[in-house]
Image (tube, rainbow, N blue to C red):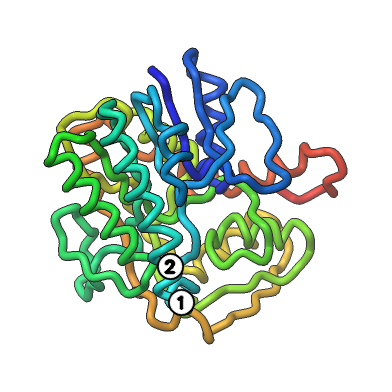
Amino acid sequence: MNIGITGSKGFIGAYLSRRLLAKHSGPVRLLVRNTLGHGSVDGAEMVHGDLCSTTDCDRFAAGLHLIYYLAHTNSPVNSDRDQATDVMMNQVPLLNLIAAVDRLGTKPHIVYFSSGGAVYAPKHDNIRYRETDACAPLSSYGIQKLAAEHYLRLAAHKGRLTATVLRVGNAYGTLLPQHRMQGLIGVAVNSVLHNRPVRAFGNPGNVRDYIHLEDLCNMADRAAIPSRPFSIVNVGSGSGHSVTDVLRLIEDCYGVPVEIQTDVSCGQWLADWVVLDTTKAEQEFGWSAAIDLRSGILGMMAEWSREPGATTATV
């Protein structure tokens, strides 16, 4: 099976790429933009290009049986600042790729990484979200993700491809740059390990469903074979933790008090509770999350402590 990945430089895409290159015996093709700093990746076929180019889309998609689509710009916190640009940067590239596979006639299977936290309508009953629940995104980010799902559904209906949409909870598992506005755990742990304050956006009482990258990639493996022409499945732990819960857990795992700087100027409109029902993933894919939040955070700290130059952390 020839596999391609878009968005391989993002933290989920990079993790998935490394995993596939280590486990998959066939070709793995990575699409990266024509910018400086993108060298070769051992074992990968590199296609330098941009999804905004129809020619580059044709070059990337040619001969692929499976495409993991992770390309996306912006986050729920900043996507509304320029909604027109948000559409051009995120919707047009996907449509270009769909048009390319239609021209090529290859009918690949696309695994699309959507959002389990941004597409659903706000709830007031704290009952876990199912895939059949109403969708009413509160950000341009969520709107783009939901629109992408519908375009893939339409393409599958017309027989151009098959698609499995993964509505992913809040992914974590690697350290992230401290300036990022998305990826609470990766940013917070990195800040703590470097003895810097943690910046938290919006309401610290907001509850989310956190899923480790290893569990997410296990689900991505299972989604590689289509069970039907088009399918949507939640990928989460099924458990909710508030921002405050997460930061206190990080503090407990590190063993040292953590300085928290709450920024309520961003994300005030974000949903206050999103936890995913993963019954469908369990029944149709035989998948469930295996890594609990404490173990995942401790693993991140332990991995960092083994890196050259890292100072000793209490873990």
The residue pinned by badge 1 equals: 82
Question: In the image, is residue 44 above or below residue 48?
Answer: above
Q: In what element is the residue under mark 2?
A: helix
Answer few, some or many: residues within 10 Å of disc 2's Cα (few below 14, many 20 plus, some between 14 and 19). Answer: many
Give 182 or 294, whichever is nearer the viewer. 182
Residue 250, picture quadrant = bottom right
What residue is at 47 percent from the left and 15 percent from the top?
26
Residue 45, picture quadrant = top right
What residue is at 33 percent from the left and 58 percent from the top?
145
Give 122 or 110, whichever is nearer the viewer. 110
* Residue 292 image position (x, y, % from top left): 46, 45
- Asked if marks 1 and 2 touch (Cβ < 8 Å), the reply is yes
Question: In the image, is residue 203 above or below residue 41?
Answer: below
What residue is at 40 percent from the left and 32 percent from the top?
61
Determine if residue 237 is in view. Answer: no
The amino acid on which the numbered mark 2 sits, given as a three-letter code, is Asp
Give 255 or 195, whichever is nearer the viewer. 195
Determine if residue 82 is in view. Answer: yes
Q: Quadrant of the N terminus?
A: top left
- Say whether residue 67 is left or right of residue 157: right
- Say whether residue 188 is left or right of residue 233: right
The residue pinned by badge 2 equals: 86
* Residue 149 image position (x, y, % from top left): 25, 52
What residue is at 41 percent from the left and 58 percent from the top?
90
The amino acid on which the numbered mark 1 sits, given as a three-letter code, is Asp
* Residue 101 image position (x, y, % from top left): 31, 35
